[in-house]
Amino acid sequence: MTMTKITESAIANNDSARDVMGKDKLRELAVVLFERVRENASLDWTIKENVKTKLKVIVKRTLRQYGYPPDMQKPATETVLNQAEMIAEEMAHAE
């Protein structure tokens, strides 16, 4: 499963988001989130708090920009970052 698909499932795991935004806009948001996290993550981002904080701000800002329901932004942000961290660990072990 790709990071984009995982990100999409993380942000679509909210009935109100699916109802308000629709499937296509959620898919677009997932792609944008994936790209922004990928562009801003350093090799050791999972252990550097300042990089984690920056990524959290980027994800939150992107969710707001796309009209993601405010009541679910915090859990979606945490889920996206947790999934990105798991994928980073898997990639590190695969090399």
Image: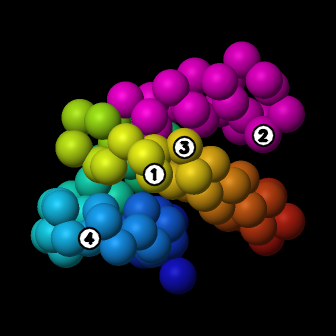
Q: Which residue is depicted at the point 85% across and 65% down? A: 93
List x then y, in percent, for residue 62: 33, 37
Label 4 to label 1: alpha-carbon separation:
12 Å
Foreground of the two, 19 or 89: 19
Residue 35 rendering spot, x and y as whole percentages = 38, 46
Measure the alpha-carbon separation of dots 3 and 2.
19 Å
**78 in magenta:** no
The residue tagged with tag 1: helix, strand or loop?
A: helix
Q: Nearer the viewer, residue 50 or 77?
A: 77
Residue bearing mark 3: 74
Which badge, 4 or 2, is on the more N-terminal residue?
Answer: 4
Q: Secondary structure at mark 2?
A: loop
Instruction: Give the residue at mark 1.
Output: 72
Specify the amino acid type for callout 4. Answer: Arg
Specify the quadrant that holds the C terminus: bottom right
Q: Residue at x 22, y 44 (%)?
A: 67
Whether the residues at callouts 1 and 3 have beta carbons within 8 Å, the answer is: yes
Neighbourhood count class around disc 2 (C-alpha, 10 Å): few under 14, some 14–19, many 20 upward = some
Total labels drawn = 4
Q: Given the image, on which type of amino acid does mark 3 rest?
A: Lys
Please state which amino acid type lies under the numbered disc 2: Thr
Q: Earlier in the sequence, mark 2 or mark 1?
A: 2
In the image, the segment drawn in magenta is: 40-61
Q: Which mark is residue 18?
A: 4
CA separation, marks 4 and 3?
Answer: 16 Å
For label 2, the residue is 46
Residue 44 in sight? yes
Q: Earlier in the sequence, mark 4 or mark 1?
A: 4
